[in-house]
């Protein structure tokens, strides 16, 4: 079984300040973890992924995430928010050993960036 | 190369009509997924195809929903006797064998009047 919880449904930051979007997961197997971003009326775009290599993962647009097994967390961070970062963010867990590769999506976090 | 494509991009239909939504995965991707995203909600898994294996239909919400994948490539999601609660964006994704990184299409926005 697997599940993912995004701890904040909405996050609001000022432009130029750090971003933290929190994600906790559970998985019976070694998980792969992903963050996707969805801009309004657009499809989902992969930001970054963890697949059992380095625990600190760097993605596009200056985002990064750290896999912490002891805390079952995969929080997404960015040092300095930009207006274009305003979007919906989804944390995803996938355990290829189970459910034939089916992934479980979090409910999403809406990021608002204030000027 | 070409990404995942979906058609139509928008579909407006009347309650009770049948609709077909199409997904063209990335060439060579053996896995294909359908999801539903209702307004302001996360993604709801519908169905998963992997190669020639029997599809995982565990997410289909009712027997009005069905999907097929012809020749291991293009997939069609069919909704029969549409209801207003079927209104949502339907997203398709594909991935390579052995990878759980999914590539998403732009979605089809379905509106049932």
Image: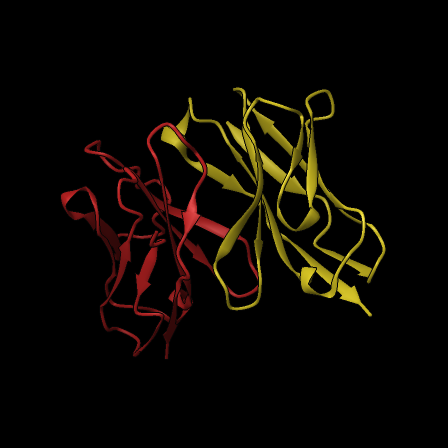
Chain colours: A yellow, B red
Q: Residue at x 52, y 19 (%)?
A: A29
Figure disc tally: 0
Q: Is residue A74 visible?
A: no
Q: How far across and how far down the image is residue B1, in percent?
A: 34, 51
When asked about the image quadrant of residue B16, the answer is bottom left
Q: Name the residue rendered at 30%, 41% in the picture.
A: B57
The residue sitting at the front extreme is B1
| In the image: residue B105, left or right of residue B8 | right
What residue do we see at 85% from left, 55% from top? A17
Q: Is residue A33 above or below residue B16?
A: above
Decide if residue A2 is on the left or right side of residue B21: right
Q: Nearer the viewer, residue B110 or A49?
A: A49
Q: Position of residue B14 (x, y in %)?
A: 30, 79
Position of residue B47 in the picture relative to residue A79 (left or right): left
Q: Is residue B52 visible?
A: yes
Residue B35 in percent (x, y) is at: 40, 51
* Residue B81 higher or lower than B42, as above or below: below
Task: Tell which of A25 and B70 is nearer to you.
Answer: B70
In this view, the residue in front, B89 or A81, is A81
Residue depicted at 56% across the width and 39% down the height:
A34
Which quarter of the rendering shows the C terminus of chain B? Answer: bottom left
């Amino acid at each position: 079984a697997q599940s993912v919880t995004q701890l904040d449904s909405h996050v609001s930051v000022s432009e130029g300040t750090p971003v933290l979007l929190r994600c906790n997961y559970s998985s019976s197997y070694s998980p792969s973890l992903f963050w996707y971003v969805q801009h309004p009326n657009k499809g989902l775009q992969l930001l970054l992924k963890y697949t059992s290599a380095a625990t600190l993962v760097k993605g596009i647009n200056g985002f990064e995430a750290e896999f912490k097994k002891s805390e079952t967390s995969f929080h997404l961070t960015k040092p300095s928010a930009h207006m274009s970062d305003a979007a919906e963010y989804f944390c995803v867990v996938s355990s290829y050993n189970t459910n034939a590769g089916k992934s479980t999506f979090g409910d999403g976090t809406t990021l608002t960036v204030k000027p | 190369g070409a990404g995942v494509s979906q058609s139509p991009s928008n579909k407006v239909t009347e309650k009770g009509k049948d609709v077909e939504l199409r997904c063209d995965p990335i060439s060579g991707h053996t896995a294909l997924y359908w999801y539903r995203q209702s307004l302001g909600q996360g993604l709801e898994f519908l169905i998963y195809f992997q190669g020639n294996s029997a599809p995982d239909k565990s997410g289909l919400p009712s027997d009005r929903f069905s999907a097929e994948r012809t020749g291991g490539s293009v997939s069609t999601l069919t909704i029969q006797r549409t209801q207003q609660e079927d209104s949502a964006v339907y997203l398709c994704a594909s991935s390579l064998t052995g990878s759980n990184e999914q590539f998403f299409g732009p979605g089809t926005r379905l509106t049932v009047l």
